[in-house]
Amino acid sequence: MLALPSARRPDWTEAVLLGPETWIVLAAGAVSAAIAAAIAWLVRKREFEPEDITIGFLGPSLAAMYLLVLAIALATEWQTIGSAQQAVGNEAVAVRQLYWAATGLPPTSANQLRHQVRDYAALVVRHDWPQMERGTLNDRSEQALTAMSTFLLKLNPASPAAATAQQYGLAQVSAMASARAGRESAAETRLPAGLLAAAIATSAIVCLFPFAGGIRSTRVCIALAALQAALVTVGVVVIFQLNNPFSGPLATTPDPIAAVAALADAR
């Protein structure tokens, strides 16, 4: 039997608080805050002028535009992540059901089908996932599904039970193919370049706007400007981190399929 690693059980403290994505977010926020504080320090001697009515109107408008772009981007990414997780869960269920469907076939055919199912699960975990983490997916696992479907179609059931198992197995292969297509679609889905450009542009404007409005050289004003720059930068970094549902802090993992494969391999 082909051994597979058991499902990963992540340490959420380490994954969430000590993961590389967290350090990237913190570093980006710290750098942007330092830059904002440095700019505020450089313009500290400029005399504060009364606030212009146009600048007072633009401030909330620019903030609203930034929040709108941020909300659209995060909502789109969250939907893609949800679709990817659902596809993986459906595929894991179909893999398990197909494995058990082999019980109704003759012994030789049942062993061949179980072997194909284990190989497919290994292929998904070891081959598909590294590719999807890079945003691509070739057709190797699709070819494996085609081979399983062809194998089932060529069977000549000698009993009603075997015929039922054959039809049920074909239905599960179809479900696996649909779930795999969902994984492929999610892996290749990215935010439009225009939306990413809008997120960067509005973030930069919101970060620099306090200085255009005549920021006072008090510590409180400088601290608030630095905090605003840090928070806005963190928002943009998170958008880029979540742009692939199979990588980043909320990455969809192959754990459901690996768990089913490990269970099948143990029998």
Image: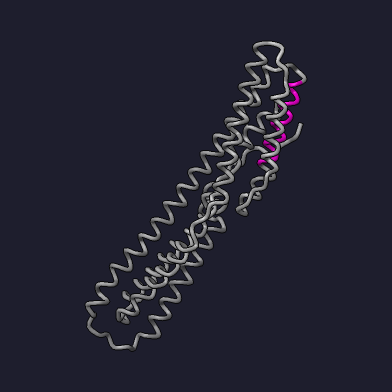
Q: Which residues are magenta?
A: 109-124
In this figure, which colouring scheme has been used for the structure? Answer: one colour
Please tell me in which quadrant of the rendered image residue 121 appears.
top right
- The residue at the point 58 percent across, 35 percent down is 91
In the foreground, 28 or 93: 93
Q: Horizontally, is 37 left or right of 165 in the view?
A: left
In the foreground, 43 or 122: 122
**Residue 40 in the image, given as x and y percentages of width and height:** 38, 80
Q: Horizontally, is 45 left or right of 135 in the view?
A: left
Q: Quadrant of the C terminus?
A: top right
- The residue at the point 62 percent across, 38 percent down is 7
- The residue at the point 42 percent across, 68 percent down is 230
**Residue 262 in the image, given as x and y percentages of width and height:** 67, 33
Q: Horizontally, is 184 left or right of 103 in the view?
A: left
Dominant secondary-structure state across the stretch colored magenta: helix
Residue 157 falls inside the magenta stretch: no
254 above or below 68? above
Q: How many marks can you see?
A: 0
**Residue 83 in the image, given as x and y percentages of width and height:** 50, 43
- The residue at the point 52 percent across, 57 percent down is 241
Please tell me in which quadrant of the rendered image residue 168 appears.
top right
66 above or below 91? below
Residue closest to the far top: 159
